[in-house]
Amino acid sequence: MSTWKEYLEDNESSYLDELCEFLRIPSISSLPEHANDVRQAAEWVADRLKTAGIEDVQVLATPGHPVVYGQWLHASGGPTVLIYGHFDTQPVDPIELWSQPPFEPVIKGDRLYARGASDDKGNMLAPILAVEALLKTRGNLPLNVKFFFEGQEEIGSPQLPDFISSHRELLACDLILSADGGQWAKDQPTLVVGRRGLCAVQIDLKSASQDVHSGTYGGTFLNPIHALARLIDSMRSPDGRIMVDGFYDQVRALSDAEREQIARIPYNENEYMNGLGVQQLFGEPGYTTYERAWIRPTLDVNGIWGGFQGEGIKTVIPSEAHAKITCRLVPDQEPDKIAERVAAHVEKHAPAGVSAAVQKLVGTADPYTIPLDHPGNQAARATLKELYGKEPYVTRMGGTIPVSGIFLKFFLKFLDAHMVNFAFGLNDENIHAPDEFFRISSFKRGLNAYCMMLERLSQQSV
Amino acid sequence: MSTWKEYLEDNESSYLDELCEFLRIPSISSLPEHANDVRQAAEWVADRLKTAGIEDVQVLATPGHPVVYGQWLHASGGPTVLIYGHFDTQPVDPIELWSQPPFEPVIKGDRLYARGASDDKGNMLAPILAVEALLKTRGNLPLNVKFFFEGQEEIGSPQLPDFISSHRELLACDLILSADGGQWAKDQPTLVVGRRGLCAVQIDLKSASQDVHSGTYGGTFLNPIHALARLIDSMRSPDGRIMVDGFYDQVRALSDAEREQIARIPYNENEYMNGLGVQQLFGEPGYTTYERAWIRPTLDVNGIWGGFQGEGIKTVIPSEAHAKITCRLVPDQEPDKIAERVAAHVEKHAPAGVSAAVQKLVGTADPYTIPLDHPGNQAARATLKELYGKEPYVTRMGGTIPVSGIFLKFFLKFLDAHMVNFAFGLNDENIHAPDEFFRISSFKRGLNAYCMMLERLSQQSV
């Protein structure tokens, strides 16, 4: 009988083919016209779990996109690990900047290009295949495993709080491993001890009852685009501080030791700028780049529109102008409270002459933290050290996995279960952007890592 | 033999049918995919001129959309009048705000709804049909008439300066009548003694080399939407003055008498606001609403875009943000110079951390004025007074007819010919906006007015 390592090697090429098949499903959760594709991705995952030998596999409905659940619970007396990931993807615009169609995977060297390759299909498929390798070679798993995959991560997991709350028994576990996330670099592992949260609003300004001719009326009433520009500009000081009243009130200051931990991580400003393609960085005074990205909250306009966007000119004063804003949040900011403060800012600062409305958008996430010395983290540390031959950095993530805050709320409180980052994406993989890719070497590493991690967890108390 | 008046009455219904046919051609000049429709509209106009009895009708090429020319030059020794109009239309977006398809004309009471109904197909068809009525009933015209219709007015007549310059002999005339424009109100005629000019630029800001994840990078570099908001806001003071250096340098102050002329025109602020659907007006301090619309220059963002505009959220920091800007200009501002000053402002004020480019857009127009006591204006005054039973107001127009500045440059300088507004659109007819319409009563009035005006002009020196 072969080892799981040999089994993984033997199946490398068919596993890659399967990942490509998964990536061909355009499961964009934010676009209603792709709802069936998200559903199809759920079915694909469920089938793959069954093939792997997972039991009681179910596609479970929520009021929005479905979730997929499966389990293998024959390690009597052993701990239970729940593995999390998501099978939905971001939209693809701006489509014209892709080098190939986003849902037609292309391999170039070590890179597999497709929307969702890194975030999160490549990462979430790894533990399924790792468990298959263990089952096929050992005949069993070293501990109890539950899989929980969702299809609404990219829209903020709006129906998951209710779903998790009402399925606590089904999902009960001792530890959660997140197959959504990543490592520091190709050769450098990381332990993630914090993630920022999120809230989202849309601002809608209205002026005249319809678009009017800029010659006839230009100069006599307030153009809503100018009003929106002023309003947006009022939200941040020129040096990068958020000017929304009370925005920072709930921010918990990090200890010197925690900031020292961040300062220990190597930082090369030129490399950072080159990665972004910018000539200059910009951010809140008094904080390093990593601190700005991980432990400080932000307010960013993700989209703005109003009036004519076609070729040439249209001499119109539009009746409306719009902006979508998300704020990245840190402990102990509460998403709803921050959204309300942004709304209050709009109400207070919207220039007279326009009517302003603020709608909260679906996409709330609580910030998340896990103690560095948590046994799950220590198991990850040992596994990653074995895999990379290096001690992991202790970092935080600027991004959100909405479910992590939900898990924290339900699982930590009721089950004392924490969530450990155990995924292998890298920062340069263009997630949420054109030409997203996943490294084939990372995919293979993920397969091995999950086998090693599950074996290690079975030997220690989590 | 019937009079032209009887002839017009007899043909009223078929003339309306013909206008509807003309309106069904979606001759949007700004959209390349409608170039053939603009061409088709030109052919339609040429055919209609021939049917009317106009001679030497030609569709003449320019490097862009064509022009249509025709003449009737048998009034030996009489003056020559050139009648101007345009057969292209504005785009139709936002299409969802139309009550019916924009190129399927619908009559509701006195209103004929369609894109281009008022601006300018209804207005420009009137003189063709009026001339037909004169020819069919008198057997001749009381003076020499040339028709000159263009297909690029809505994109700023970019090829017309060259065309007019190289066809001065063909277009030579004693007076130009513009069938593009309008009257003050259903029951109130107007003499237009000035029109604002135009220049147009697009601002393109770029930050990162591509869209990036707002969690990973949010807070560490400048979001180009925030930079654009700041830049746009820097262009106007909160009280409505344009803050672009040198913007007002060339503005010629109006005399007290000229301002007094404007002040004499009845103004009802509530009506004005109701027409726009706004609760409040806004504009440059020290000027009345009419002055702001007619004799003061503006800077308006006509369109803004960047990042995600779909449903829900996309947690992206876009790599680019864009704005289209037009300035309405007054004597003696020069369009190129003002565009350069806006570009200089962008260069000076674009926040560090973004790269900013400014492109001049096609759509330049010199401001235009005509002396109130010009014989052409006096003939219009007498004709309008006879038609409406009221003395016309003396007004200006905030909007641009690009060709008017071109005519001024070539015809006034070389031929001493001025352009007189002689059209019957009204301000509430949603030109450049959804649900554009033209009043059937205005169409009929235009037919009669052109017959009367041509007869009157033949009796006086122009």
Image (cartoon, coloured by chain):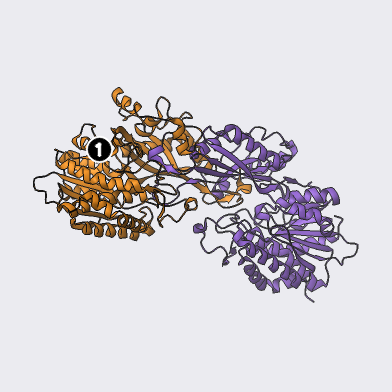
Chain colours: A purple, B orange
Looking at the rendered image, the quarter that the C terminus of chain B falls into is top left
Q: Report the residue that reaches farthest toward the left.
A: B77
- In percent of width and height, residue B441 lies at 34, 46
Of residue B311 and residue A256, the one placed in the foreground of this image is B311
Subunit of label 1: B
Residue A84 position (above or below residue B412): below
Residue at screen point 74% across, 58% down: A84
Q: Report the residue that reaches farthest toward the top.
A: B256
- In percent of width and height, residue A358 lies at 61, 41
Of residue B221 and residue A288, the one placed in the foreground of this image is B221
Hey, what amino acid is under mark 1? Answer: Glu
Disc 1: CA contacts within 10 A as few (<14), some (14-19) or many (>=20): few
Residue at screen point 75% across, 46% down: A369
- In percent of width and height, residue A212 lies at 43, 42
Looking at the rendered image, the quarter that the N terminus of chain B falls into is bottom left
Name which quarter of the figure residue A446 lies in: bottom right
Residue A426 shown left or right of residue B110 in the figure: right
Residue B276: in sight, yes or no? yes
Residue B59 position (above or below residue B219): below
Residue B165 position (above or below residue B43): above
The residue where tag 1 is placed is: B386
Q: Report the residue that reaches farthest toward the front.
A: B1
Residue B321: in sight, yes or no? no
**Label 1: element kind:** helix
- In percent of width and height, residue A154 lies at 65, 54
Q: How many marks?
A: 1
